[in-house]
Amino acid sequence: MKFTVAVDGPAAAGKGTISRRLSNDFGFRYLDTGLLYRAVGVIALHDGQGVLDPHWAVEIARRLTEDDMDRDDLRTSRAGQAASKVAALPEVREALLEFQRAFARREGGAVLDGRDIGTVICPDADVKLFVTASDEVRAARRHAELNNGQSFEQVLADLQARDARDAGRDTAPMVAAGDAHLLDTTKLSIDAAVEQATAWINERL
Ligand code: DC
């Protein structure tokens, strides 16, 4: 059985939590595609001693392995910014495309979360979700999660800069697919969002 759930939306809207819950409940495999871009960004920064070289980032994307996604330095805000920068390079996206498509087609069902899953990676996904929340609510969640001494205002500015880059790039910008279900988690609890998404998936199964 092949069944793909595409989950897109801005940072800290709840995509990851919702995707993980859905993949557990339905027994589908889960891929956090942001980790691919984070790994490319972090390795490129590391190799360039703090400087991001676009040509080198493309090479890294072409050679990326699943082990690279297990690094323990991918969740920092620096990694998020680096990811967003390398993600704007069309050749980096191209290099990571087939791995994501193959994952989506695996037997047993798959949930992928990212920015362009419903629009570019899996335009034929069985169910598409676009998860959003207000900037303030997302920044508050990320601030609590990071707990690294950064102020709320810094976290908010960081998220807004990343959203602007992710939505404003020419290649595969972050945008809701025309046939995506919208889930605004500003007021909706994660439980309620999962319940709603579960109903949409069951309708298609
Ligand atoms: O989901 P995340 O915050 O871990 O993603 C980090 C960055 O990677 C994000 O700012 C944009 C980029 N990204 C992307 O361009 N396309 C994806 N499918 C996933 C992430």
Image (cartoon, rainbow, N blue to C red):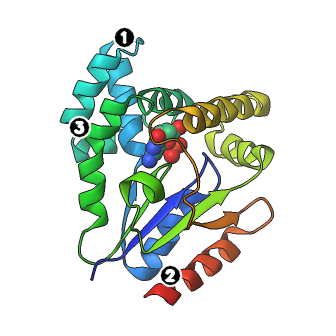
**Which residue appears at 37% of the width and 79% of the height?**
27
Closer to the camera, 92 or 52? 92
Q: Position of residue 98 (x, y in %)?
A: 24, 50
Label 2: state its secondary structure.
helix
Report the side of 62 relative to 43 (left or right): left
- Mark 1 or 2, closer to the camera: 2
- Mark 1 or 3, closer to the camera: 3
Query: Circle 1 sits on which residue?
Result: 49
Q: Earlier in the sequence, mark 1 or mark 3?
A: 1
**Are the residues at dot 2 and dot 3 in contact (C-beta closer than 8 Å)?**
no
Label 1: state its secondary structure.
loop
Quarter of the C terminus within the rendering: bottom left
Q: Earlier in the sequence, mark 1 or mark 2?
A: 1
- Mark 2 or 3, closer to the camera: 2
Query: Circle 3 sits on which residue?
Result: 64
- Residue 201 got which mark? 2
- Residue 123 got which mark? none
